[in-house]
Every structure is written in C-alpha cells, then in structure tokens.
C-alpha cells in the first residue's frame, strides 16, 4: 500500500519515507493517521507534484513498510514526534507546509508547538487544535464548555478507550473481520487495510491508543488549559461534515488557539475525506499553500 520511497534509519528503526518532487514551490510533509499508511495521500501527492512541490510522506511506526515493534512503549506520541523531527533534520527540510490527519494530526499539532520556526503553513484534516479537542469536555466555565459539548466529545471518542481493552486485535480479525467492517464502515478503502493486516496477522496501530490513553489528555487539560499552547503558524482545518469520529465544534473553536491566520473549511465527506472527496481537499490545500496555478485532479498514476 505504501507510496514509492526509501528506507531511512530513524530513532533506531527502519522507516519507509516517500520523497518525490522538484520542490520548486516548496516542501509539503504529509503524516497519515489510523489505520492507514502513507498511501492514504495517493490523491494529494500527484496534485502537489504537478504544482511543483516536493512531497515527504512517511509511513509512521507500525504502518506500511516501516518497522513494527511489538512493545507498546515505542508508540508513545513523543517518540513519533521525535521521529518526524529526525526525518526533517536528515532531509534538511525547512519552510515546511505540514499536513496531518487523525493520529497524524495528533502528531503534527505538537510539532507546530515545539518548533514553529520549521513550518510555513499547516493543514489538518478533521482534527482541530488539541486544546479544543480535549478542553471542551471539561471546561464548564466558558460558553464553549457546555454539558452538551462534553457529551459530544465523549460520544465520538469512545473508540479510543475501546482500543485499549484486551482482545481488540482478535475481535477485529474474528469472523472474517466482521467487527472491523462495522467499525470502519465509512473507510473508502477498508479492503486494502484488511489485506495489509492479513499479510502480517497483527494490528500494531492499536498500540497508539494503548500507549497514549486519551483520558490522560483530558486530565492534563483539566489541570492546565494551556498544556497544549496556542500555535503561531498559519492553520487551516478541513472538516468533513459526515465525519463519524470528530465533532465540528472542536474545529470551529480552533481559531481561538491560533495566533496567526486560521481558516476552517467545511466540506462534504467522511473521516477519510482525502480519499472520498480528494478534489475538494486538493483545491483547498493547494490554495492554502499558495499555488497560483494547479491541477487538483486526483490522478493516482502520477504518485
């Protein structure tokens, strides 16, 4: 499933990293989420390449052609963030246009907070500022922290607790992946994801939720609302209106946590909008990054 690329030694692991394009227009780094690998950007990469960008697309730890350690501790988000920074350093990247989706956004938002000088602009699919994602559930002192929004957050985040329970790997694969089909019913390419699991007989990406229990993020933001500080990089959040896993108010509230230009774009599509509505994502992404002329069409053959 992975995009064409090379192997890089990152954090002691073999990382598969796709590095394509001239870079005449700049650099775009795209970080995937669960349960995908870098191939989930197969519709964005051709449009970005056609516009003159250099595209950096890693398979993060446990996915695609990158190493898949069994030990849960390797999947702590701070480790993966360090891996992303190491890729950036080894490739000599700067003025990066950064893109994240799902867990990829949970990785890339903190990157903006830690080293904003590396990044030119940011685009997050579905996921707003993490202070909004985790803060809304408990902040009852402000208008945005209502009981209704708390329930909105809990109802859509139940699966993160679900994934931490023993036996989830077996449950997903039981009865010819019947439960998997139900859970990922909105994934446009769930058959390809299933085939990747069948090749190894393991689901390492569950380790992300196990190693990083989100209840700790809720507790941390309850104690300190600024545990996830404001970002100083221009941000665009693309929120698909049929997203089953993220709720709209965490995107709507994001401009309050961005000390720079911030744009919220609503589009049609489900959680994997880069796959089910690629042209809508492409035109907004390319406009945001500042391309004067481009072909937004999702021509997979060019990836």
Image (tube, rainbow, N blue to C red):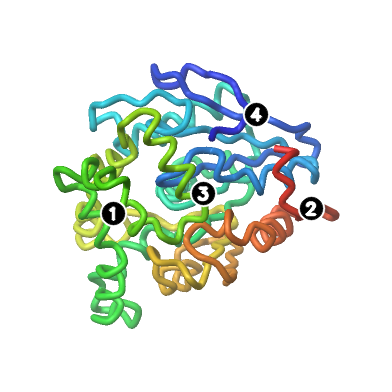
* SS state under label 3: strand
What is the C-alpha distance between the residues marked 4 and 3?
A: 17 Å
* SS state under label 1: helix
Q: Which mark is residue 291?
A: 2
Residue with the mark numbered 3: 100
Mark 1 neighbour density, 10 Å: few (under 14) some (14–19) many (20 or more): some
Q: Are marks 2 and 4 in contact (CB under 8 Å)?
A: no
| Of 159 and 168, the residue lying toward us | 168
Q: x and y percent of residue 8 in the render?
A: 52, 19
* Labels 2, 4: front one: 4
Mark 3 neighbour density, 10 Å: few (under 14) some (14–19) many (20 or more): many
Tell me if residue 198 comes above or below residue 140 in the rendering: above
What is the C-alpha distance between the residues marked 1 and 3?
A: 27 Å
Q: Quadrant of residue 199?
A: top left
* SS state under label 2: loop
Residue with the mark numbered 1: 179
State the quadrant of the C terminus. Answer: top right
């Amino acid at each position: 499933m992975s995009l064409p690329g090379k192997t890089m030694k990152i954090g002691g692991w073999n990382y598969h990293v796709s590095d394509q394009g001239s870079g005449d227009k700049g650099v775009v780094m795209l970080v995937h989420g669960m349960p995908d690998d870098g191939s989930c950007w197969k519709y964005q990469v051709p449009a970005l390449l056609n516009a003159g960008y250099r595209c950096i697309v890693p398979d993060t730890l446990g996915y695609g052609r990158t190493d898949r350690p069994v030990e849960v501790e390797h999947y702590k988000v701070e480790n993966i963030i360090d891996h992303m920074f190491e890729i950036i350093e080894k490739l000599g990247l700067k003025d990066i246009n950064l893109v994240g989706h799902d867990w990829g956004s949970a990785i890339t938002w903190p990157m903006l907070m830690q080293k904003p000088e590396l990044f030119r602009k940011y685009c997050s699919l579905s996921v707003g500022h993490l202070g909004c994602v985790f803060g809304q559930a408990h902040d009852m002192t402000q208008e945005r922290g209502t009981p209704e929004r708390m329930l909105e957050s809990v109802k859509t985040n139940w699966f993160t607790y679900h994934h931490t329970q023993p036996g989830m790997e077996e449950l997903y694969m039981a009865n010819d992946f019947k439960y998997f089909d139900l859970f990922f019913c909105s994934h446009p390419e769930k058959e390809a994801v299933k085939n990747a699991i069948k090749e190894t007989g393991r689901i390492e990406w569950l380790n992300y939720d196990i190693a990083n229990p989100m209840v700790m993020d809720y507790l941390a933001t309850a104690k300190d609302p600024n545990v996830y500080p404001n970002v100083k990089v221009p941000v665009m959040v693309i929120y698909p209106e049929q997203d089953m896993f993220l709720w709209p108010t965490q995107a709507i509230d994001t401009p309050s946590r961005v000390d720079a230009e911030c744009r919220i774009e609503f589009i049609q599509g489900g959680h994997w909008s880069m796959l089910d509505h690629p042209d809508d994502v492409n035109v907004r992404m390319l406009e945001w990054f500042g391309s004067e002329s481009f072909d937004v069409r999702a021509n997979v053959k060019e990836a």
